[in-house]
Image (cartoon, rainbow, N blue to C red):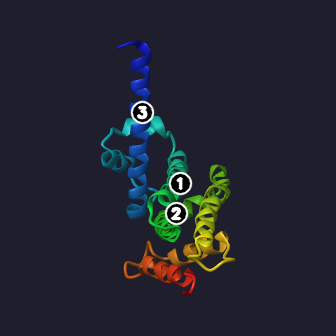
Amino acid sequence: MTQDQTTELKRVDARRNEQTLLDAAAELFVTSGVNVPVRDIAARAGVGTGTVYRHFPTRAELVIAVYRHQVEACVQAGADLLASQPSPLAALERWLLLFADFLTTKHGLATVLQSSDPGFVPLHQYFLDRLLPVCASLLQAAERAGEVQPELEAYELMRGIGNLCIGAETDPNYRPRRLIQVLIAGLRRPV
C-alpha cells in the first residue's frame, strides 16, 4: 500500500468517526441535554474520549457541528425524498416529519444556541438559508402536481411546524407528528 493510499484510508476513517460522533451526540442531546458527559458520547459512538476531543476540542464546537450536520441531513433528504416518493406531496409530508424530528433536537439545543457564545450567532441564519429553499422546492413541486392548495409560503409552513414542535421534548404525552399530519391533510387540494 502506498503512502497516499494509507493517508486516504486514514481520512476516510476520520470522516466516518466524525459522522458517528455527530449522530451519537445528536441522539444524546435529545435525551440527556447538551451537557451530556463526553464519555457517554464516545461510548455511544464506539470511540475513545480522545477521538471526541480530537474532532471537537470544545463543547461549543461539538454543538455547532451537530446542528450543522442535522441541517445538512435535512437538506439532502429533500432531494432524496422527491426522487424516491410516489408523489411530491408524499415527499413533502416525509420531509416535514423529518424536519419536525430535527426541531425536537434543536429545541433541546435552544438554551445553548441562545447563549452569548458568538459561535452560535450565525446558526439561525444558516438554518433558514439551507432549509427554506428545500421546503419551498418540495412545496412548489406539490403545487405544480396539483396536490396542494397554492400560495402557501415555505416560511409559514416551517414556522407552523416549528410551533407545533414546541414542548415535545418535555411532555411525553404530546405528539406533534399527529398534529403535523393533520396540518398536511389540510394542505391537500380539495377534489
- Check contact, mark 2 vs mark 1: CB within 8 A: yes
User: Residue at left 65%, top 56%?
Assistant: 116
The CA distance from mark 2 to mark 3 is: 26 Å
Q: Amino acid under label 3?
A: Ala
Label 3: which secondary element: helix
Residue at image position (44%, 58%) is 84
Q: Which residue is mark 3?
A: 14
Viewer-closest of 63 and 76: 76
The residue closer to the viewer here, 10 or 143, is 143
* Residue type at tag 1: Tyr
- Label 1: which residue? 67
Give the spatial CA distance, label 2 vs label 1.
7 Å
Of the numbered discs 3 and 1, the one sitting upstream in the chain is 3
Quick one: label 3, few (<14), some, or many (20+) residues within 10 Å? Answer: some
- In this rendering, the answer to whether 179 lies above or below 91 is below
Q: Are marks 3 and 1 in contact (CB under 8 Å)?
A: no
Q: CA distance from mark 3 to mark 1?
A: 19 Å
